[in-house]
Amino acid sequence: MRKNLRESLIFKQNRSIIYIRIVTTNFSIFKEKQVLKRFNIILNIIMGSSIGVFLVHFIYNYVDYKQNKFSYGIQSAPWYTSSIIYGLVTIFVITIVVIIKILIFAKSKDVNKKID
């Protein structure tokens, strides 16, 4: 009788340890998914800000060119040269962010496989 009681206590202890491990594992996966979502939101903000800066700069240059054509006529470079540079930087930033988002998507697939 004493041996069976001891074995059942060990079984209950092991069962609770397994249950605790499952709960902590699911919590860490949940936390990891939340971090990936937040990081994705930050990357979306960076992409939107980069595009916004480019568009505002281009509109400002165009309006300034229309108002002061003579001052731009003196320069050897066309009026849209700085907009081209902003555009190239925007394309570079968006390319980097898209690559990071692809890596995050692959990581989130791994996290979803852990849940299943």
Image (tube, rainbow, N blue to C red):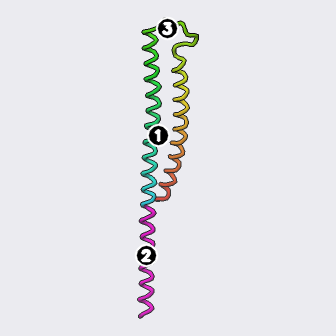
Q: N-terminal of the two: label 1 or label 3? A: 1
Report the residue at 42% width, 69% height from top: 20
Please say if 103 is above or below 89: below
Nearer the observer: mark 2 or 1; the answer is 1
Dominant SS of magenta comes to helix
Would you name the residue on which mark 2 appears?
15
Would you name the residue on which mark 3 appears?
71
Q: Residue furthest bottom?
A: 1
Q: Disc 2 residue type?
A: Arg
Q: Secondary structure at mark 3?
A: helix
Spatial separation of the CA atoms under disc 1 and disc 3: 39 Å
The image shows residue 52 at horizontal and vertical percentages of 43, 28
Image quarter hosting the N terminus? bottom left
Q: Disc 1 residue type?
A: Leu
Q: Residue furthest right?
A: 76
Q: Nearer the viewer, residue 87 or 26?
A: 87
